[in-house]
Image: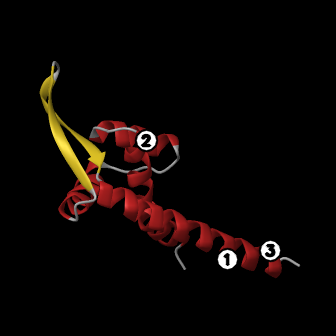
């Protein structure tokens, strides 16, 4: 079995949660998101991020605004919507329940 593939699928599954959590803290430009995700040891490329941001925007979980840049084209800054905040709260609850369950199973299997 390929562990790299399994690890990639696990990271992919929590990417929306991480992105919404970061944008809830402050509005962000794509390079800000990539840098923050890398600091958290989740390496993501723009080609993965843009479709996900578009899907979150189309689902009305995110909105954006354009800002002129002194170093190139205008930048798109993303912010979380009220609907996105409610969705994030649901994800946080689900994440806590999931990690509690997994930790319980792992600790029981080690005894």
Percent position of residue 78, x then y: 26, 44
Question: How far is the residue under mark 2 from the one under mark 3?
Answer: 33 Å
Residue that lies at the very extreme toward the right in this rendered image: 111
Along the line of sight, the residue nearer the viewer: 68 or 13: 68
Are the residues flagged by discs 1 and 3 in contact, CB closer than 8 Å? no
Q: Can residue 43 be seen in the rendering of this structure? A: yes
- Residue 75's place in the image compared with 103, above or below, is above
Residue 73, located in which quarter of the rendered image? top left
| Residue at horizontal 32 percent and vertical 38 percent from the top | 27
Q: In the displayed structure, does residue 75 sit left or right of residue 34?
A: left
Q: Tag on residue 107?
A: 3
| Residue at horizontal 16 percent and vertical 18 percent from the top | 70
Percent position of residue 2, x then y: 52, 74
- Counting residues from the start of the chain, the first of labels 1 and 3 encountered is 1
- Counting residues from the start of the chain, the first of labels 2 and 3 encountered is 2
Percent position of residue 76, x then y: 18, 39
Q: Can residue 16 be seen in the rendering of this structure? A: no
Disc 2 on helix, strand or loop?
helix
Along the line of sight, the residue nearer the viewer: 82 or 98: 82
Disc 3 on helix, strand or loop?
helix
Split into 4 quadrants, where in the image is the C terminus?
A: bottom right
- Residue 19's place in the image compared with 32, above or below, is below
- Is the residue marked by circle 2 packed among few (<14), some (14-19), or many (20+) residues within 10 Å? few
Q: Tag on residue 101?
A: 1
Tell me the residue that label 2 is attached to.
Answer: 25
């Amino acid at each position: 079995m390929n562990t790299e593939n399994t690890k990639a699928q696990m990271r992919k599954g929590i990417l929306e949660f991480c992105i919404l959590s970061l944008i809830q803290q402050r509005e962000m430009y794509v390079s800000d998101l990539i840098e923050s995700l890398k600091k958290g040891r989740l390496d993501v490329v723009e080609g993965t991020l843009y479709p996900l941001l578009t899907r979150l925007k189309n689902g009305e979980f995110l909105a954006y605004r354009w800002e002129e840049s002194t170093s190139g084209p205008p930048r798109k800054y993303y912010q979380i919507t009220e609907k996105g905040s409610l969705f994030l709260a649901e994800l946080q609850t689900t994440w806590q329940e999931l990690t509690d369950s997994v930790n319980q199973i792992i600790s029981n299997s080690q005894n």
